[in-house]
Image (spheres, grey):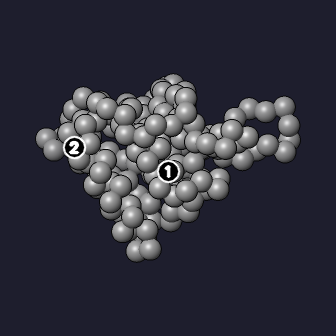
Amino acid sequence: MRSLITTITVLCMSPSAFAGESSLTSTFQPLDGLGAGRIIIVGVTCHYWDSHSGQPTAIGLISAKNVPPTNSDKATQDINLASASHIYFGCDDIEAEAPTMVMTADRFIAAGGYPQEEILRASLECLRRVLPPKLLKVDLTFTSSPENREWMTKIVAEYNNSDRKKIFYEGEE
């Protein structure tokens, strides 16, 4: 009986032993400049759950919603253009022999009244800024809807052929 109780206790406690830990981490996001009328690339601090997952946390957080604190009940929109435009970045385990980076833009829409090419370029600049050294030479692959594939292919190819140590998009800061 005692061993049964011990076994049940261990089985019930096991999931919490594997739970991820949260932490604060920083990334860059392409933000709607609101009244400025231009995209602003900004370093932001994010609360990341599963921060010990083995994946570069800053990459996925480029697409995290960004609703800044306000003193108004009217201004509650997501000002992150990557998130609002449905551009998502991901990376597998950075310790993998051949890590991969993927951009998913299957539901892309140009948010904030900005040209679609500028939103994508600004999002890719955010990616460039957060890349760890091991991913500097890894090509980005992507998925998109058929109507966006042609122009996105050109920009992603330009990004993949660029020097990741040099600025890809000149946004405001």
Q: Quadrant of residue 141?
A: bottom left
x then y, percent, for residue 85? 55, 56
Mark 2 / mark 1, whichever is N-terminal: 1
In the rendered view, tell whether residue 92 sits above or below residue 40: below
Give, as a three-letter code, the residue at label 2.
Answer: Val
- Identify the disc placed on residue 118: 1
x then y, percent, for residue 95? 21, 35
Kindly identify which residue carries mark 2. Answer: 138
**Residue at x 38% of width, y 68% of height:** 149
Say what secondary structure mark 2 lies in.
Answer: loop
Residue 93 left/right relative to 66: left
Question: In the rendered image, is residue 6 in sight?
Answer: no
x then y, percent, for residue 29? 52, 38
**Residue at x 24% of width, y 29% of height:** 133
Residue 75 left/right relative to 136: right
Q: Quadrant of the C terminus?
A: top right
Q: Quadrant of the N terminus?
A: top left
